[in-house]
Image (tube, grey):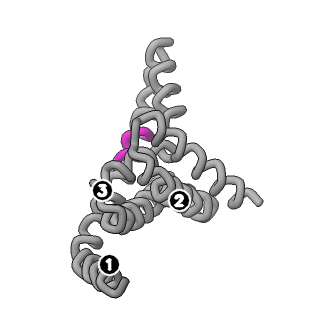
Amino acid sequence: MELVLGFIFSFLSTLGFGVITNVPRRVLIPAGITGAFGWTVYLLTEPLTTSIILPNLLAALIIGLLGNINAVFIKVPVNLIYIPCLVSLVPGVVIYASLKDFTLGYYNAAGHNLIKTLTVALALDLGFAIAESLFKKCRHIISKNRIKRKGNL
């Protein structure tokens, strides 16, 4: 049940953030589905590890692969899909806690939370980089299939 609710609410949050950031309408549904799958992968891998790196890395990898595939099919830059999908994965609470601890003078806690934030950001970036490099190898296959299908219609 938690996975289904996570999928639904991640879809809605991705959709909502896409609306707020003026993503074109034709991108909203594919971006919502992509973000929901990314968050579902996060939820599935989080209990399997004590690290925050693996769930974020795998979620970013899924978002990167699905985002690139959707970008080819709907003919948009992949960033229009990436940006709304990241809303569920950005460590906003940890950044807030870090800044709060810093302003209150709790420098050790602030440093710990800052390192945690940077670790998540690095995992997300690495996941997207791996997805981009994997997709670059397969892009011509997807493009050919899309053109072939379009020619048959």
Instruction: Between residue 148 and residue 61, name the one nearer to us.
Output: 148
Q: Nearer the viewer, residue 10 or 141?
A: 141
**Residue at 46% in and 54% down:** 31
Specify which label sits upstream in the sequence, 1 or 2: 2
- Name which residue type carries label 1: Arg
Camera sees residue 51: no
Disc 1 and disc 2 in contact, CB within 8 angstroms:
no
Instruction: Using a 10 Å C-alpha cutoff, classify the residue at mark 1 as few (fewer than 14 neighbours), some (14 to 19) or many (20 or more).
Output: few
Q: Which residue is mark 1?
A: 146
Q: Indicate the quadrant containing the C terminus: top left, top right, bottom left or bottom right.
A: bottom left
75 vs 22: above or below? below
Q: Which residue is mark 2?
A: 33
Q: Secondary structure at mark 1?
A: helix
Q: Label 2 near label 3: C-beta < 8 Å?
A: no
| Label whose residue precedes the other's in the sequence (3 or 2) | 2
Q: Which residue is mark 3?
A: 76
Label 1, label 2: how far apart the Cα atoms are: 20 Å
Residue 44 is situated, as x and y percent measured from the top left of the image, at 61, 64
